[in-house]
Image (tube, rainbow, N blue to C red):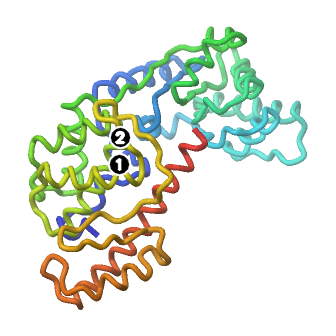
Amino acid sequence: MYEQFYGFTSRPFQLSPDSRFFFNSGTHKRALAYLRYGIEQGEGFIVVTGDVGTGKTTLVGRLFQALDAKSMVAARLVSTQIQADDMLRLVAAEYGLPFDRLSKAALLHKLEQYFRVCVQEGKRVLLVVDEAQNLAKRTIEELRMLSNFQWKGKPLVQSLLLGQREFRTMMRSEGFEQLRQRVLAAYHLQPLTEEETRQYIEHRLKLVGWNGDPYIDDDVYARLYEFTGGVPRKTNLLCDRVLLYGCLEELHHINRAVIDNVLEDVKQELWSPEPGTGQGVESDYEPTMLKSSASSRRISADSEGAGGDVASEAVGEATVGGRSETNLRSVIHELRQELKKFKDEVKQIKGRTDVE
């Protein structure tokens, strides 16, 4: 909706990870360097951790873009809440190998054969495991056993483990000594600094054709950082809401008053940010529409049809921002579509957060 209003080629702050928008901050630059170093060595485990929303998935997407597909065979596991016996089946499936009705010994044999063929063809094998903090100890042990596969003294497969902060604690606990000894490189992603947060926002805007419309005051960036703590996903969520608000109010200038209005809604709806920490407290409320300065009504995403009767009543009001009733009906229709899309994205985030 707001893309057309501001002349953007696409949404700059979508919540789904997209490596096209990768921002090379200080922490992400170092993490990428660790990843490249580890992969160049071709052995052991590489571990990257970070709090929720710090950009682990986007980082790996950027890494995959840089890899030579002709010399690297990579698979990625994202469903990690599984039993140890199912891990090998999932690995086999990701590499396109049959796994039905095969015993553990048969699966290991097939995987070893496949990895050996890849190496003999001059290719390296990389296994990426996301959400590693959800893995059971026995499941991690199955992954470690894969690293035992060798041919002519060289390992056949290398593993990259991505996880939240809890995974660091898990690895330091008793019983993970063998895994720790095989970690070649490890890095923990940090949130962006205040200056990087501004650069991050402008970086994403420029990628979709931003030319200064809307104009954003300096103190808006500081306010955004205060309530997101430099966490990219929270920054995306808040900036998306600000632009939607600006579109509905037909604003071409985003100032402190605008961000304060949006923050007031977000605090009550999605998470309650604690100033200066960036740590949001999840709310029980579903997302509701932003307040309009021209209307005291509120269009709730909980209403039937992502707007329902409340939206229909709003049409009866004289104008919104000077629009006629006909134009208002068009705006309400677009608004319902935007709310439905936004609600679906929030549910996806909540689902991932629950898993994490």
Residue 116 figure quarter:
top right
- Asked whether, in this view, residue 65 is left or right of residue 222, the answer is right
Residue in the picture at 77% in, 32% down: 113
- Pointer 1 and pointer 2: residues touching (CB < 8 Å)? yes
Residue 277 figure quarter:
top left
Q: Given the image, on which type of amino acid does mark 2 rest?
A: Pro
> Which of the two residues, 51 or 124, is positioned nearer the viewer here?
51
Q: How crowded is mark 1: few (under 14 residues within 10 Å), some or many (20 or more)?
A: some
Residue designated by label 1? 267
Q: Residues within 10 Å of mark 2 (few under 14, many from 20)?
A: many
Q: Where is residue 218 in the image (x, y as percent from the top left)?
A: 10, 41
Residue in the picture at 75% in, 36% down: 87
The label shown at residue 189 is none
Screen quadrant of the C terminus:
top right
Camera sees residue 328:
yes
The label shown at residue 273 is 2
- Asked whether, in this view, residue 212 is left or right of residue 109, the answer is left
> Which of the two residues, 354 or 137, is positioned nearer the viewer here?
354
Residue in the picture at 21% in, 50% down: 260
Camera sees residue 67:
no
Q: Position of residue 262 (x, y in %)?
A: 26, 54
Q: Given the image, on which type of amino acid does mark 1 rest?
A: Lys
Q: Is mark 1 on a helix, strand or loop?
A: helix
Q: What element carries label 2?
A: strand
Count of numbered labels shown in the rendering: 2
> Which of the two residues, 23 or 294, is positioned nearer the viewer here?
294
- Asked whether, in this view, residue 343 is left or right of residue 30, the answer is right
Farthest residue, direction front: 296
Residue 72 figure quarter:
top right
Q: Earlier in the sequence, mark 1 or mark 2?
A: 1
